[in-house]
Image: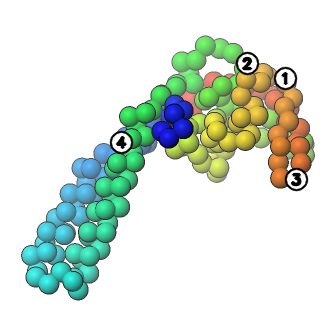
Amino acid sequence: MADNQPNYMTPAGHMALQNELYQLVHKERPEIVQIVNWAASNGDRSENGDYLYGKRRMREIDRRIRFLTKRLEGAVVIDPEQREATDQIFFSATVTIERGTGVEQTIKIVGEDEIDMAQHKISWKSPLARALIKAREGDTVWLNTPDGREQIDILVVEYIKID
């Protein structure tokens, strides 16, 4: 990492990156290599769409493989189910909050590679997570937003499995 911060991940996030890396290395890349070799054997490469596309796709796959390898090497896997019971918010917490607008929301604090807004998974580096980290159940924190400061009440802090 350029910023020398740990690359925290949940077990599910770690497994997803491992699966993607396996798929690229053992399935997609060998298929593209085969297509490129076949296309190269057809002669003129300058106007050979299969060859040109294949080479470009292989570069994309290789770049993604390098990225995933680096992310996995620096991974610190934290299993929320193995954490010591606490009402304080740390990485991998599932937190139910009430926003200043009165809306109740449950969010999961996950690694940067696991963000999924549809499943309410936010990065531990996000402004909301940073405001919540180290606070406790029952606390009120303030989040600076483009529209001003928003009050956030922490209702429930849990350490449960994150899929």
Element carrying mark 1: loop
- Residue at the disc numbered 3: 147
Which quarter of the picture shows residue 140?
A: top right
Q: Hey, what amino acid is under mark 4?
A: Thr
Looking at the image, is mark 4 or mark 2 nearer the viewer? 4
Element carrying mark 4: helix
Residue 87, labelled with which disc? Answer: 2
Q: Position of residue 109 (x, y in %)?
A: 64, 35
Q: Residues within 10 Å of mark 2 (few under 14, many from 20)?
A: some
CB-based contact (under 8 Å), mark 4 and mark 1? no
Q: Hey, what amino acid is under mark 2?
A: Asp
- Residue in view at x 73 percent, y 23 percent: 134
Q: Earlier in the sequence, mark 4 or mark 1?
A: 4
Q: Earlier in the sequence, mark 3 or mark 1?
A: 1
Residue 138, labelled with which disc? Answer: 1
- Residue in view at x 68 percent, y 42 percent: 126
Q: Earlier in the sequence, mark 2 or mark 3?
A: 2
Colour convention of the picture: rainbow
Q: Position of residue 91 (x, y in %)?
A: 62, 28
Q: Position of residue 28 (x, y in %)?
A: 28, 58
Taking the view exactly as shown, the residue that stands out farthest to the top is: 84
Q: Is residue 127 above or below residue 160?
A: below
Mark 2–mark 3 distance (CA, rounded to whole Å) = 29 Å
Visible in this render: residue 65?
yes
- Residue at the disc numbered 4: 69
Mark 4–mark 2 distance (CA, rounded to whole Å) = 34 Å
Q: Hey, what amino acid is under mark 3?
A: Asp
Query: How many numbered discs?
Result: 4
Q: Residues within 10 Å of mark 3 (few under 14, many from 20)?
A: few
Mark 2–mark 1 distance (CA, rounded to whole Å) = 9 Å
CB-based contact (under 8 Å), mark 3 and mark 1? no
